[in-house]
Structure formats: structure tokens, C-alpha cells
Image (cartoon, rainbow, N blue to C red):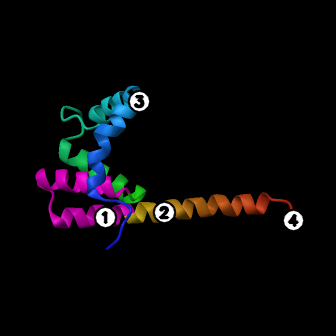
Amino acid sequence: MNSYQSPNDLLLAQRMIALAPKEAKAFLAFDHAAKRADGEIPPKIREWIALAVALTTQCGYCLDVHARAAKSLGTTQEELAEIVLIAAAVRAGATMGHGLLTLRLFEQAPAA
């Protein structure tokens, strides 16, 4: 299967960091803080949240990283399936919510 995304793209991360070191340093500090193991949310649940977000943003790289991390923390296929379906339902709900907004904006727009 041909794809623009490739796991090998992650090898370019060091180059990206070198090209924009100040921004990369800030991003990496934020990323590490969000992934910390000593927060109120346990690491396994943090990975579940990351997976749900990756599913809704459709980031293949994030799915790769967080699926592996979740599995290493003991996530089962059944739990993964539930995460996928919860994310799908929330995404569908967001579409409905935006549909309601669109309907209101449509109704408020002047007639042609």
C-alpha cells in the first residue's frame, strides 16, 4: 500500500529539532510534561486518552507510538476496541454538534 506517511518519517525528528531548536525544545518539554508518570492520571489511562485523541485527529504516527505504549502498559484488544468506538462516537457527536451550529447559522442568515 502506498502512503505518504511512513514510520521511517519519525527518523527525521532529530533533523526537525535541529532546524527549529527553540520551538522543538518547548514542544518536547510540553509533550514530556503531558506524558509524565507521576500525575493524578495513571500512565495507562494517559495512553488511552492519547489513543482516543490520535484516533480523532487521525495521526498515524501518534497511533503507532500510543498503541505500542498502551500495549506495553497491559491494554487488551478488548479495551482498545472500546477506545476506538468511544472515540468514534464522540467524533460523531461533535459532527452533530457542529450540525446544530450550522443549522442555527443557516437560519440566522438573510434570505437570498
At mark 2, the secondary structure is: helix
At mark 4, the secondary structure is: loop
Residue shown at 19% from the left, 31% from the top? 38
- In this rendering, the answer to whether 19 lies above or below 84 is above
**Are discs 3 and 2 less than 8 Å apart at CB?**
no
Viewer-nearest residue: 13 or 64: 13
**Are discs 2 and 4 less than 8 Å apart at CB?**
no
Residue 18 visible in rendering: yes
Percent of width and height locating residue 11: 26, 47
Q: CA distance from mark 3 to mark 2?
A: 34 Å
Residue shown at 36% from the left, 66% from the top? 3
Q: CA distance from mark 3 to mark 1?
A: 32 Å
Crowdedness of circle 3 by 10 Å Cα count: few (<14), some, many (20+)? Answer: few
Viewer-nearest residue: 110 or 65: 65
Q: Which residue is mark 1?
A: 84
Q: CA distance from mark 2 to mark 4?
A: 29 Å
Residue shown at 34% from the left, 34% from the top? 17
Residue type beneath disc 1: Val
Q: Which residue is mark 4?
A: 111
Q: Which residue is mark 2?
A: 93
Most distant residue in the bottom direction: 1
Residue type beneath disc 4: Ala
Residue type beneath disc 3: Glu
**Are discs 3 and 1 less than 8 Å apart at CB?**
no
Type of secondary structure dominating the magenta stretch = helix
Residue 51 visible in rendering: no
Closer to the camera: disc 2 or disc 1? Answer: 1
Q: CA distance from mark 3 to mark 4?
A: 47 Å
Q: Is residue 84 magenta?
A: yes
